[in-house]
Image (cartoon, rainbow, N blue to C red):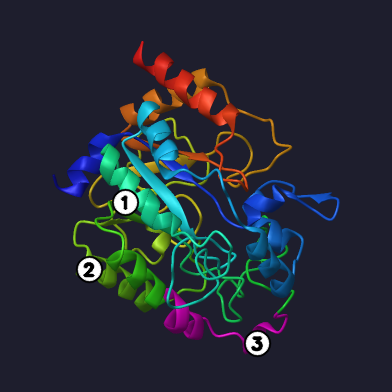
Amino acid sequence: MDNRKWFKEAGYGMMAHWGLYSLLAGEYKNRRVKDYAEWIQSFMAIPNEEYAMLAKSFNPIYFNAEEWIKLAKDAGMKYFVFTSKHHDGFALYHSKVDKFNVVDATPFKRDVVGELAEACYKHGLKFGLYYSQELDWHHEHGGGYDQFAPCSGTSWDNNWDYPDRSKKNFDICFEEKIKPQVKEILTNYGDLCLIWFDVPHTIKPEQSLELNRMVKEYQPDCLINSRIGNGAYDYVSLGDNEYPEEKPTGFENADPNSLGGYKYSPYGLYESAGTLNSSWGFKYFDQNWISPETIAERRSKMNSLGINYLLNVGPDGLGRIPSFSKEILLQAEKIFKK
């Protein structure tokens, strides 16, 4: 089936934010993050040398790809999107481009993306990958250094290890790391239903277009979300936890480089990604759970408007999806089916 047709009919998917930040669980040196736990390195301005030490402790012995995917399937999801690399620059797959990855830098030494891809194939879910194509705090030239707008951390770029923004050149990061890593995830993990890019600010139009062409060269049916930047996308990712009351019809006057409110989708494909509590990554003290009734209601409303609902879970540092998340998701599916 053509992925555009499939996407329009899918309706519901699971996203998972997981990485080194999951070990900190939203707290560092007796301080707690204000909102997103996956932004903790920036919020606390943790030096790369110190943050990289977390990799030596990353050994999630309870991670079980099949359990994650079976939960998604039992909860009614049709696809699964995983953070192959978030803003901290740490890859959850075996990257040959940068040894700051789960196989080379941790005692775990397992390719998480590969195991999830296999589990999705086995259980009949489509597989997609999130990849932070601009922000990369582990790289001196990671993007976001032209932004002064508020964010969930100290700054969009790494201004604690690399404070002199005048010396930064995103072109270097793009050529050295971003492009070759995107090629890796496109060529090593089977068919991907989508690539979920994020936070375009510094990235140039020609760079967004180059990534688009790369995706279409290696995986012609793989859909690209609007957060690739500069209009080089197939479907619209709405803002974080954005749930419109009416069917999207325009976005013609919107900024395609903003976090939400992008231009219209040329194929009528829309998606809203949301959280189960107040964070995407695991935050142990966050008990602000949404109810199963709310999930079922939002799913029904979004689907009636032609918008997919991509609902996130934040596994802990040992690889466990919190029991609260499991219970809420399974109960929401029961309510939705009534």
Question: If you read the primary sequence from the N terminus, does the residue marked by circle 3 or circle 1 appear first?
Answer: 3
What residue range appears in magenta? Answer: 162-178
- Position of residue 15 in the picture relative to residue 143 (left or right): left
User: Residue 159, located in which quarter of the rendered image?
Assistant: bottom right
Identify the amino acid type marked 2.
Tyr
Disc 2 designates what residue? 218
Secondary structure found at label 3:
helix
219 or 229: nearer the eye? 219
- Residue at point 55% right, 37% down? 321
For the residues bearing labels 3 and 2, Cβ distance under 8 angstroms: no
3D distance between C-alphas at marks 3 and 1: 34 Å
- Residue at point 50% right, 18% down? 293
Circle on res. 166: 3
Inspect the magenta stretch and tell me whether residue 76 lies in it: no
294 or 219: nearer the eye? 219
179 or 106: nearer the eye? 106
- Neighbor class of circle 3 (other Cα within 10 Å; few <14, some 14-19, many 20+) is few
Name the main secondary structure of what is drawn in magenta.
helix
For the residues bearing labels 3 and 1, Cβ distance under 8 angstroms: no
Q: Position of residue 286 (x, y in %)?
A: 70, 36
Identify the amino acid type marked 1.
Tyr
Disc number lying in front (1 or 2): 2
Quarter placement of the C terminus? top left
Secondary structure found at label 2:
helix
- Residue at point 60% right, 55% down? 59
Q: Position of residue 273 (x, y in %)?
A: 46, 42
